[in-house]
Image (tube, rainbow, N blue to C red):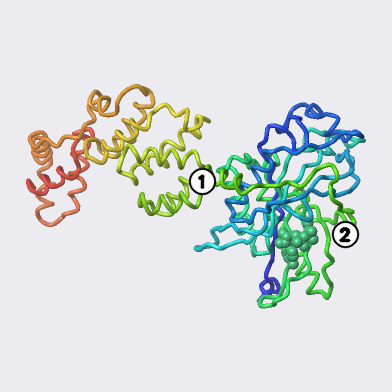
Amino acid sequence: MSIYEKYETVIGLEVHVQLATASKAFCGDDARFGGAPNTHISAISLGHPGTLPRLNKRQVEFAIKLGLALGCEINLENTFDRKNYFYADLPKGYQITQDRQPICIGGSLRIPSGEDFKTIRIHHIHMEEDAGKSIHDQDPENTLIDLNRAGVPLLEIVTEPDMRSPEEVDALMSGMRQLVRYLGVSDGNMEEGSLRCDCNVSVRLKGAEKYGERCEVKNLNSMRFAKRAIEFERKRQIDLLESGGTIKQQTLNFDPATGITTPLRDKEDAHDYRYFPEPDLPPVIITEAYLKELDQNRSPLPWELLEEFQSTFGLPLYDATLLTQEKTTALYFKSLCQESKHYKAAANLLINKILPEIQEQKIGLAEFPLSQKQLAEFVDLIQSDKVSNTIAYQKLFPALLKNPNQAPLALAEKMELIQSQDEDFLKALVENILAQNPDKVKAYNSGKKNLLGFFMGQLMRQSKGKANPKAAEELLKELL
Ligand code: ADP
Ligand code: MG
């Protein structure tokens, strides 16, 4: 057994979600991503003396929506604190956050793990604001500062150390991304930094009860980097322990270029930040009535739809998972199922044709040119054997896309794609084929039964795909 197999990796996350509010957490500045540097700013986000913060109601609403979805207890009286530190991209010299009384406590998220599912517990969720951005790579001499992001509202979700592999971290982040998009509280875009995490990593001998000392890798905004950072840390910590060293609790930076982590600073304790109650913001008081209102108008949740798609529509887990990835897709599928009762066939159409098509055209489902009524008719044409599956997908569907105003049945008729159930038509075809291939007929009848495939091929070709395969096969067998 290699030394690495003796150890188990333990991971806890601090997930940062940038909220999709119009304005910043404590002032009216534009909170959107991007913009020319230092244009989404004001005296408040620049931290000028004498300015006062004002709470953004939407941030509270979004925090509660996420908390309710994750089964957290909502802290009906929660408070803000100041976390003090000096950095050039933090013009106030402190960050407004929640330390003593965060808005959500507890809760959990179920993630796929291997063939099974696993529940990751959440310690709490708190509201805070983002810092600005330091840009190190645009000027050889100076660090440039963009304060557009300073004061943008964030939620920080702190998990318990319940993950054991980079794959579980990936699953948790994917689950969070899916959930915040369902709830409409964030776009969950990792490239733009709307979703990022700090990974706390430790190792312990398998079977050990106590957790090992942990290190925290800061600000990972891609799952690929998080995976590499965790794998690097795991190995580094095990090597250190095996050579008789001890792990020192540290805050680390991961450099994607070199693939290694380097210490940013020794782990700071809470007192290093001199946390104290934010004097300029009163406690946030949430009423039961407000909670009820949010709960009553809540969005369907991904795992609810996943369950419904399997139980009500009889889809396999794989299809249900794909179709519930995004809420718009899931709701689209649901309303398609109002039009056609052939749920599995409708799912196939969506998964195999429509989703790839809109991805290629870079449009949303709302812009897809065919109506659900047309799609349902298309599915029903296949299911009722009017048009063969192959012909429908290869000929009818592309034609429909070019003529989005046509009804599928009418277009299929015009293109002469309707399968013939007509006995005489089929019979004439079969007789013709048998007459053309006397040798093969003889061979078939002396035992080469797999020649049936050859005859079927001929038949489908000569009928241009319009022969109903089932009826044709029966007739072939009979006349052979
Ligand atoms: P702080 O960063 O303020 O010290 P905590 O000690 O509560 O806060 O831990 C923060 C994060 O570290 C949480 O996500 C938690 O799951 C994780 N964590 C705590 N202990 C360990 C450990 N031994 N190994 C890995 N992660 C840990
Ligand atoms: Mg921390």
Q: Which residue is mark 1?
A: 325
The residue lying toward the viewer, choosing from 163 and 332, is 332
**Residue at point 88% right, 56% down?**
265
Task: In the rendered view, tell whether residue 451 sits above or below residue 160.
Answer: above
- How many numbered callouts? 2
| Cα gap from disc 1 to disc 2, whole angstroms | 40 Å
- Among numbered discs 1 and 2, the one appearing first in the sequence: 2
Task: In the rendered view, tell whether residue 454 sits above or below residue 140.
Answer: below
Q: Which residue is mark 2?
A: 266
**Residue at point 73% right, 30% down?**
30
The quadrant holding residue 118 is bottom right
The residue lying toward the viewer, choosing from 198 and 58, is 58
Residue 232 shows in this picture:
no
- Find residue 274 and report its horizontal and vertical position in percent: 89, 54
Residue 366: image tag? none
The quadrant holding residue 458 is top left
- Find residue 234 and report its horizontal and vertical position in percent: 73, 64
Ligand 1 under 8 Å from disc 2 Cβ: no
Residue 365 shows in this picture:
yes
The residue lying toward the viewer, choosing from 329 and 225, is 329
**Residue at point 38% right, 51% down?**
315
- Secondary element under disc 2, as helix, strand or loop, is strand
Q: Where is the N terminus found, in terms of image quarters?
A: bottom right
Residue type at numbered disc 1: Gln
The quadrant holding residue 424 is top left
Is 23 on the left-hand or right-hand side of 470? right
- Mark 2 surroundings within 10 Å by alpha-carbon count, few (fewer than 14), some (14 through 19), many (20 or more): few
- Secondary element under disc 1, as helix, strand or loop, is loop
Residue type at numbered disc 2: Asp
Q: Quadrant of ligand 2?
A: bottom right
